[in-house]
Amino acid sequence: MFPQQPTWSNSRISLMQRCPRAFVLRYALAQVSRHHERGEILSIAFQIQTPWILLHQTIREVVHDYVEDHVNGTVWSNGLIGSRFKMDYEKAMQMRNQLIERIQAHNHHTSFQKRQPEQHLIDMGIKTCIKLTQHPVFQNLLVQGSIERIELTTPISYGRWKLYSAPDFVHHGPKGKSLIKLNLYGLPSRNNRERQAALTRLYGNHDSTVVLFSLKERKWIVNRITPMNNQVQESLNLVANDVEKMESILSLVGRNNDLSLIPLADSYRSCMHCNVRFLCPSQHGLEKAKAEQRTLMCQ
């Protein structure tokens, strides 16, 4: 049913853990039925992000462009950073509203509502960008050696898997290759940081250092990690388990795109901001939907 190369990413495994039904809709049915109306609606729905997520995505994009221009000899002023962020964030919010309108045009109601950019979020994003570009560690990376941007959609093949754990930048300095990654949604636990660094090291050398910039309470926290070979292997073992679980869930769909065996979310909290709740039985209540699913499975 799904012959594509087994693919792993943090976003995929996180979605599957929150809700296997949403995982199947996004990474299976939305792709195989993309030329039909239902598949088109699914694809559009999963492109819609909350203003909060768009805020952080815009921070990443602005920082990427800042570094590219810096490499070419153009250093942005704080004013330029501010105007770029404001323009990009407003554009992202406009595109979000257009996606919502497209779903509504199909006579579907989504929990997402059209919103206008809020000034306090714009101010927050500008300050966050400036704090990073002025951070001493970040500045040292820019002025020492060379640095290049890596697209986050750049995969790396390992065996039969395709892994997405790319750094934001690769830095070549006197001490070798460093991989720079931005964590925009808080400071991960130590174990998660080490696991993340171990997979990111696959994009470098066996002695590459991973530099993590984590945003916690609007402050940037820096961690330098040089993963050992055994840590990389342990992380790959976890990836193997994740891929096995994902393939197992996808195999339950069958040839007729039957979703009756695909588990629903464990918690109503997972449904609160779900992109595709309007296409899910849980829109009428998660517990009721689970009871109906159990009945179907017992028939």
Image (spheres, grey):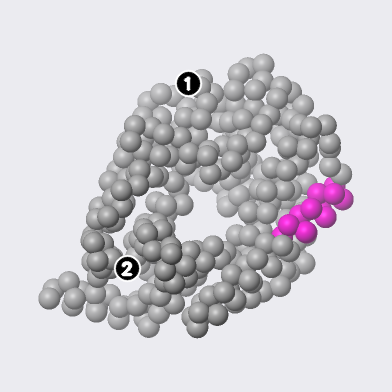
Q: Quadrant of the C terminus?
A: bottom left
Marker disc for residue 264: 2
Examine the structure image and report whether residue 101 is included in the region drawn in magenta. no
Up-down relation of residue 168 to residue 224 (above or below): below
Q: Amino acid at mark 2?
A: Leu
Q: Quadrant of the N terminus?
A: bottom left
Asked whether 59 or 124 is in front, the reply is: 59
| Residue located at (39% from left, 64% from top) | 33
- Which residue does the numbered mark 1 point to in the structure image? 206
**Location of residue 196 in the rendering, given as x and y in whole percent from the top left corner:** 48, 39
Q: Amino acid at mark 1?
A: His
The span shown in magenta is 78-89
Element on which disc 2 rests:
loop
| Residue located at (31% from left, 40% from top) | 240
Examine the structure image and report whether residue 79 is included in the region drawn in magenta. yes
Occupied quadrant, residue 31: bottom left
Mark 1 or mark 2, earlier in chain = 1
